[in-house]
Amino acid sequence: MGEPGTKEVLNLDDLQASSGFRTGRKHILSLLVENKPGVLARISGLFARRGFNIDSLAVGPTDDDQISRITLTVDGASHPIDQVTKQMHKLINVIKIRDLEPNEAVARELALFKVSADGDSRGQIMEYAEIFRGRIVDVSKRSVTVEVTGPDDKIEAFEQMVRPFGLIEMVRTGEIAVSRGRTAT
């Protein structure tokens, strides 16, 4: 059986998706939706009901103030993702959905790292920031805050470099993506 209160029957693919089984197939879904209250809740609820964990989620305005873009990244086999996208198409506020292939899209994320920095370690942290093309956005007596933008593997690599200094706080935006070339989403 599905979730309590539902009449849908789960199949093996659904159980694997909800059990934490990672297929290694990253899906970047780009959605154009009406800019109305409750749209994001309906979309995230659809993923939750199907047993998917959303790895990252970013929502923002487009050039049209009536439309927002939602970028979701999830891990899953193609079949369950197809089922979810078909169900999303049925939602009245969803205008367009596109499953962007990771190698055919430009994807970026922004992260802020607040790192412990005394006099001796401050220079090393600033060198790492320069190597990763990050920017120092705040400095205090005991810490440095670095902004790093790039693909998720770059963000994770920078995190591993500064963690030994004492990572006080880290904030990540979630991935945003656009297809390469002239095609519009």
Image (tube, rainbow, N blue to C red):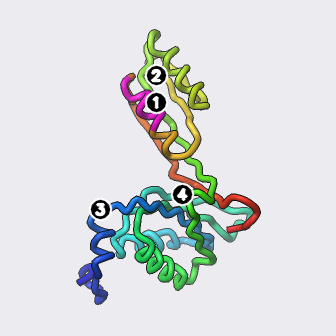
Rendering coords of residue 162 (x, y %): 43, 27
Left or right of 164, for residue 86: right
* CB within 8 Å, label 1 to label 2: yes
Left or right of 74, for residue 105: right
Helix, strand or loop at label 2? It is: strand
Rendering coords of residue 48 (x, y %): 36, 70
Q: Amino acid at mark 3?
A: Gly
Magenta extent:
157-164
Q: CA distance from mark 3 to mark 4?
A: 22 Å
Q: CA distance from mark 1 to mark 3?
A: 30 Å
Q: Looking at the image, is mark 4 or mark 1 earlier in the sequence?
A: 4
Image disc number at residue 58: 4
Q: Looking at the image, is mark 1 or mark 3 earlier in the sequence?
A: 3
Helix, strand or loop at label 4? It is: strand
In the rendered view, tell whether residue 80 sits above or below residue 180: below
Q: Amino acid at mark 4?
A: Ala
Q: Residue at x 39, y 29 (%)?
A: 163
Q: Is residue 107 magenta?
A: no
Q: Looking at the image, is mark 2 or mark 3 earlier in the sequence?
A: 3
